[in-house]
Image (cartoon, rainbow, N blue to C red):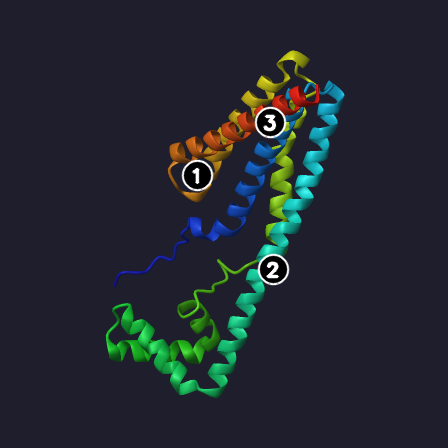
Amino acid sequence: MRRLIPHTEAHASARVGWLRAAVMGANDGIVSTASLIIGVAAANTSHNGVFVAGISALFAGAMSMAAGEYVSVSSQADSEKADLAREAKELADEPDQELDELTSLYEQRGVEPETARAVAEQMTAYDALGAHGRDELGITQVTMARPLQAAFASALAFTTGAAAPVAVVPLAAPHLLAPTVGIVSLICLAALGALGARTGGSSVMPAVLRVTFWGALAMAVTAGVGKAFAAILG
């Protein structure tokens, strides 16, 4: 008789929650901070002024990302809790109808009616709410919203991303500040795109091209705005 050997499979979907927040935070940290630095530098601001602007952008952006992510993911968590509470009430009030509904879900996925009924009964006996949450609502422990985790990941990622262009400012020559920040930031964006793609199990090159294109566009637009305002204000 063949023995079944248990093994652990690592799926990228298990990392989707924190990966999305981390990649978005780091990308925003690099792009927004680098763009601001380049825009301020293009407006003929002093070297110290550019550095202060970069530091301010780092802290303000990190707090904004944390707050925004917490509020957004908290709303998702509230919706999930409300759906599960509603499902729990339906299970208590109408257990037979809920069992029929679970059976129907399994039949729609290709399970034979008798087998679907047996599976639905066993899943209901084991964990009725968990079964309905997973198979009817699509809520699992892997995908469940975690506001604090998402907020911390976003703030940390933004800070890490923003630190790169900020660190370049005191090291770069004043007349080469904007291009130096731009080049370093694009390199960091390319590395971020590759890292995010590998961690998520997707293709690297499209991710790299995507983040570098939009990053370069954001920095170019901000540089143009900075030059325009410098010309207007004299």
Q: Residues within 10 Å of mark 3 (few under 14, many from 20)?
A: some
List x then y, in percent, for residue 230: 67, 21
Q: Reading the chain from its start, which is encountered first: label 3 or label 2?
A: 2
Rate crowding at label 1 as few (under 14), some (14 to 19) or many (20 or more) other CA atoms within 10 Å: some
The amino acid sitting under disc 1 is Ala
Describe the element under mark 3 as helix, strand or loop.
helix
- Dot in front, 3 or 2: 3
Q: Earlier in the sequence, mark 1 or mark 3?
A: 1
Q: Which residue is mark 3?
A: 225
Residue 152 spot, x, y in % from top left:
64, 48
Q: Earlier in the sequence, mark 1 or mark 2?
A: 2
Residue 141 in view here: yes
Inspect the image, locate mark 3, and give the three-letter code of the amino acid beneath it.
Val
Residue at image position (36%, 78%) is 101
Label 1 residue SS: helix
Disc 2 designates what residue?
74
Q: Is residue 37 above or below residue 15?
A: above
Q: Which residue is mark 1?
A: 197
